[in-house]
Image (cartoon, coloured by chain):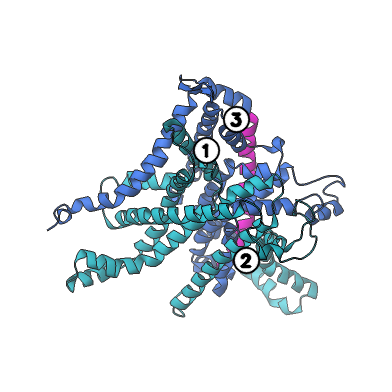
Chain colours: A cyan, B blue
Amino acid sequence: MTAAAESQALPRRRVSPLARAWAFVRRHTITVFGLAALVYLMLPIAIVVVFSFNDPAGRYNYTWEGFTTEHWTNPFGPPGLRDAVVASVEIAVLATVAATVLGTLVALALVRYHFRARGVANLLIFVPLTAPEIVLGASLLTLFLNLGTALGFWTIVIAHVMFCISFVVVTVRARLVGFDRHIEEAAMDLGANEYVTFFRITLPLIAPGILAGALLAFSLSIDDFVITNFNSGTEITFPLYVWGAARLGVPPQVNVIGTMIFAVAIALMLANVVFQWRRIPKGAQ
Amino acid sequence: MTFFHRHRWLTPYVLLAPGLAFLFLFFVVPLYYLSYTSLQEGTVQIGYTFTWAWENYSTAIRQYDKQFIRSLQYAGIATLLALLISYPLTYWIAFRGGRWKSLLLLFIIAPFFVTYLIRTLAWQNILSDDGFVVNVLQFLGLVSDDGRVLATSTAVIAGITYNFLPFMALPLYVSLEQIDESLIEAAKDLYASSTKAFLRVTLPLSMPGVIAGTLLTFIPAAGDFINAELLGTPRQYMIGNVIQSKFLVLTDYGQAAALSVILMAVILVLIVVYTRLVGTERLAG
């Protein structure tokens, strides 16, 4: 083995350019593949952005007809689009606040305390994450049908809170696990009571985790189609608007709003990446 | 002293109560109503009554066996493709990413920030009959001159693969990133070839990510109906399409609920078999 390895290694300097090229290819294949995969991931996003500037001839925004900024200056042109976006944002805000509060409390209980019902609690958090969305949506619909509840804005909010809670719990819990409880003990030693300690020490320290959970909940809510579709009644959210428009040809303004949501989300994520770069001292990782 | 100071053991339950009560009411109870509805018969006009209508199940299986099998096939192929794309991609980011890791990771999550329906519509655009993908495939002779990609099972599977790829890539990345590179170096020092070191060290250590990723991709993919609707035709319809139209268009609630229960049961059985085959203890890793 050793001899074979050496005989391969030694005459390396004299190998033909072709062999050297082959070695180069072998070394960098994975880089080429990685970059190609990134292009693949970005391709539909690029299409969405590019076609928000298209000037389609007919109803269908499929082929490039010419550049225009008309849709960006008038993003709410098509009837009903503004109402749909407003409804989506309202639902997302309400669902995020509720899911973040409920989920953070659950995460605190799961990380901080030992209690009997722990297994059941974990199961109740975990199972909604693994159930197919269509089953979540359909089962909630059967609840409302059997109880005779009118479907609309509030049934959508309930549905969104339901599927967001688990995601918030998982995100906040991840943050709480690495929490140094000595800091809290120090505060108590210095005379702070439990409430002061919680609001002045614990909450600020876990705030980034809560914020991450809230952002996740917001983006899940504003993007949700399947569960909303089942529980919306006649209420129209932005994804439902797109679904309805898909049959008749989607107006380019949908691309404009899609691009806006994408840009805001990416800006927030980039801010987070930069923030992390600054926080980690050089050589710490 | 307040009540809570005297009954400290109550604190975790007080924290858990609101969140878990919400999940119980709007996740567990709906599952009961889903099964309850699946044994009802009737129409919107005369109302629905519970009659132990087991024929909802037998008819559902007899009439929609094709869509069931198709769902599992499409989801299975898409999961495999997502794994084949994600593994080299996340390997590249985890081992060659260096300082750019978190930025490259952002590329993987980026598709999530474009509304699901909008990114699927972008694929409709990319795969459309006069789009460049079809033109290239026609040029290469892979698609006949009057052939198309859109409205075929290829398009539906491609759409599912793309839409659920981040679910595969993120857990894969997490488990690859945790691997201590000195283990791979040690294997090579002990004369393992690169291939052997990969097969005997890297791959086994990344198995928790592979298992989590395949489950997280397969489950939502099997219940999906958006890709079949927007990129396929009724000949590509999956079980999700049947459930959606029976609930929301045909108001055939009994059968729709029966189909949802069957879908959930099939997925649960597959998860149990799969985790038994690969070993659950690896999931914890």
Residue A165 in percent (x, y) is at 41, 51
The residue that appears at 48% across and 46% down in the rendered structure is: A153
* Label 1 secondary element: helix
For badge 1, the amino acid type reads Ile
The residue labelled by disc 2 is A1
Chain ID for label 2?
A
* Label 2 secondary element: loop
**Marks 1/2: CA–CA distance:** 49 Å
Dividing the picture into quadrants, the one containing residue A204 is bottom left
**Marks 1/3: CA–CA distance:** 25 Å
Of the numbered discs 1 and 3, the one sitting upstream in the chain is 3
| Circle 1 Cα neighbour tier, 10 Å, few/some/many (<14 / 14–19 / ≥20) | many
For badge 3, the amino acid type reads Leu
For badge 2, the amino acid type reads Met
Q: In this view, does B30 lie to the left or right of B173?
A: left
Badge nearest the viewer, 3 or 2 = 3
Q: Is residue A121 above or below residue B193?
A: above
Closer to the camera, A98 or A136? Answer: A98
Badge nearest the viewer, 1 or 2 = 1
Residue B204, visible in the rendered structure: no
The residue labelled by disc 3 is B250
| Circle 3 Cα neighbour tier, 10 Å, few/some/many (<14 / 14–19 / ≥20) | some
Residue B86, visible in the rendered structure: yes
The residue that appears at 23% across and 64% down in the rendered structure is: A195
Q: Is residue A238 left or right of residue A12?
A: left
* Label 3 secondary element: loop
The quadrant of the image that shows the N terminus of chain B is bottom left
Residue A226 in percent (x, y) is at 55, 44
| Circle 2 Cα neighbour tier, 10 Å, few/some/many (<14 / 14–19 / ≥20) | few
The residue labelled by disc 1 is B267
Closer to the camera, B148 or B39? Answer: B39
Q: Is residue A95 left or right of residue A102?
A: right
